[in-house]
Amino acid sequence: MRMNSVKFTNAVVNCLVEVYYNAIPKADFIKLMDDAEIEPDGRKKIPFDDYVIDDSVFKDIVEKHIKQSKIPKYLRESFRFSLYLGPSPRSVKNENI
């Protein structure tokens, strides 16, 4: 199965929406994107360091969205990297929250 870039991007955004909903403090990722300051290079600056999420909750959400969005095996690592290294909240072990 092939997946186009629009579907892949939508899956990443949908996952980030749920991740931010489960972060401390809770946030609306779509609103964060809409309100984000645009840097000179055209990228949006999302204040992801202002949010924290439990590492196990974060991983569970990512894996759930891989299954829900039917991310093909050859794209699963790219999907994870997009989330772990993208504009997601800081993930911490449970005892550090």
Image (tube, rainbow, N blue to C red):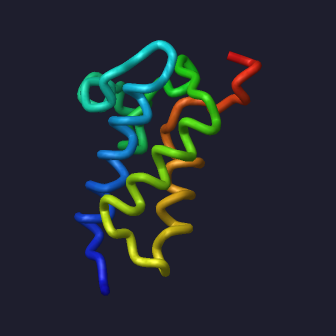
The answer to whether 92 is drawn above or below residue 65 in the figure is: above
**Image coordinates for residue 10, horizontal then vertical, percent:** 26, 55
Q: How many marks?
A: 0
Q: Residue at x 56, y 68 (%)?
A: 77
Looking at the picture, tell me which residue is in the foreground, 65 or 4.
65
Quarter of the image containing the N terminus? bottom left
Q: Residue furthest top?
A: 25
**Which residue is rendered at x = 32% and y = 59% of the image?**
68
Please indicate whether residue 34 sits to the left or right of residue 76 in the image: left
The reply, left or right, for residue 51 in relation to residue 8 is right
Q: Quadrant of residue 43?
A: top left
Image-based side of 15 in relation to 4, left or right: right
Q: Quadrant of the C terminus?
A: top right
Q: Position of residue 91 (x, y in %)?
A: 63, 32
Q: Residue furthest bottom?
A: 1
Q: Position of residue 49 (x, y in %)?
A: 58, 23
Vertical placement of 47 versus 16: above or below? above
Residue at image coords 53%, 58%: 80
Quarter of the figure with residue 27: top left
Q: Position of residue 51 (x, y in %)?
A: 53, 20
Residue beneath the point at 41% across and 29% down:
20
